[in-house]
Amino acid sequence: MTLTGKGYYIWIVRYCEDGDPDRIAALAKEANLSHVLVKIADGSFPYNIDLDNGYDYARPVIKKLQSLNISVWGWQYIYGDYPDQEAEIAVSRALNLGVNGFVVNAEKEYEDKSKAAAASRYMNILRSNLGGMPIALSSYRYPSYHIHFPWENFLERCDYNMPQIYWIQSHNKAGDQLMRSVNEFKTIRPFRPIIPTGPTFKQDGWVPTQDDVVQFMNVAKQLNLTAVNFWYWEGCRKYMPNYWELVRDYQYDTTPHQASLPQSYIGALNSRNASSVASLYEDNAVLIRPDSASQGKAAIQSRVASLIGSSSNGHFSLISETQNKNIYSFQWMCTSPSGPVIEGKDTLGVKNSKISYHYSFTKPVSA
């Protein structure tokens, strides 16, 4: 899966449109955001949960955004003193909330050389438990300024690199700084596709100019970076609404990436909306399982709802896929916070970009 388009970070959900999921989703759709990144953990603790009544502000926002086909990535700030506990809450929250990807935000605490082992331990737990869910690193823009930061330990288990390109106290250098960041990361192994994060915030009297922000996006496109992010929703909307409009109106068009039908199918399952899955089928499609056959969207939607209901609110991951003309074969797994729940092997026959027939074999995973 390739991340494309524009994305915004959300730090504190209740400060975004008063925490209203409908309003957040509508604004994201209006701004043509392809993805939103929501904080779901901080250190060893869940985040965006009301400590008094246990209300989870993140959950309804995530579900509403996904219902509009906007990808949602969870993110966590980590400190490295308790890597096992930090990884465990990350896995639990990511799988329980059904996010589409996960971002690791590591900064000054990892400038200590002794934290390299903690970085590896944390990342190994994440990768072992999140299956095929894409993972990204959000950290500094210039690795040359942070030579003790364990870049390799993080990036070897990541799919993306999301450096923070913040030109604080400078102007007219946004493009230069982005190009320098990309070039420096090309010397780091392993290199991961870069999705840079730009600033739409104020700090210590500094504010980026609108020309800065446009230059940042223009150069990202020139470098063929498939997506850009911005920090951060609530600050921009409250203090810099004209910058929100600037990003909203900017057409960040890159070479479109057409998701395969297996990718679309797994993504629709993670929306936990059976009608979204059924929309991938032809009206007269047939779903064949070892014990039954279902024909037509209504019957297929009922079977899909049953599959989603038996998934223990787990996250569906695509393990592998192959294509031979109009036939796709793929394997997938559904994983809950307690471990794998269901695994499947499926074959799709495609006609006019819709599923015409579907052979599906699923089985529960033994504990």
Image (cartoon, rainbow, N blue to C red):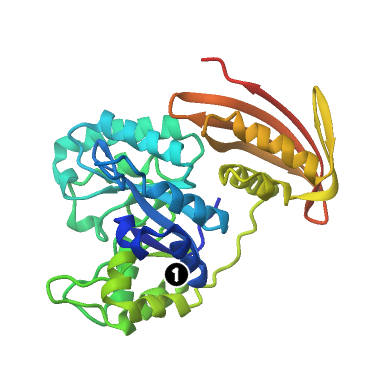
Where is residue 189 drawn, in percent x and y? 35, 47
Residue 80 image position (x, y, % from top left): 20, 37
Q: Looking at the picture, how far across and down is residue 153, in whole percent?
A: 30, 39
Looking at the image, which residue is at 26% across and 37% down? 45
Furthest-front residue in view? 53
Indicate the secondary structure of the residue bearing disc 1.
loop
| Residue denoted by label 1 | 223
Front residue of this view, candidates 287 and 147: 287
When the figure is inspected, residue 38 is found, relative to residue 4, above or below; the finding is: above
Decide if residue 206 is on the left or right side of residue 22. Answer: left
Residue 224 visible here: no
Asked where in the image residue 143 lies, by quadrant, the reply is bottom left
Q: Alpha-carbon neighbours of circle 1 within 10 Å: few (<14), some, or many (≥20)?
A: few
Instruction: Please state which of residues 207 and 28 is positioned toward the viewer in this rendering.
Output: 28
User: Please, is residue 228 above or below residue 157 in the view?
Assistant: below
Res 24 quadrant in image? bottom left
Callout count: 1
User: Which residue type does callout 1 highlight?
Assistant: Leu
Q: Nearer the viewer, residue 189 or 104?
A: 104
Residue lying at 38% horizontally and 46% vertically, measured from the top left: 190
Task: Please tell me which residue is depicted at 12% across the width and 72% down the height of the picture.
Answer: 204
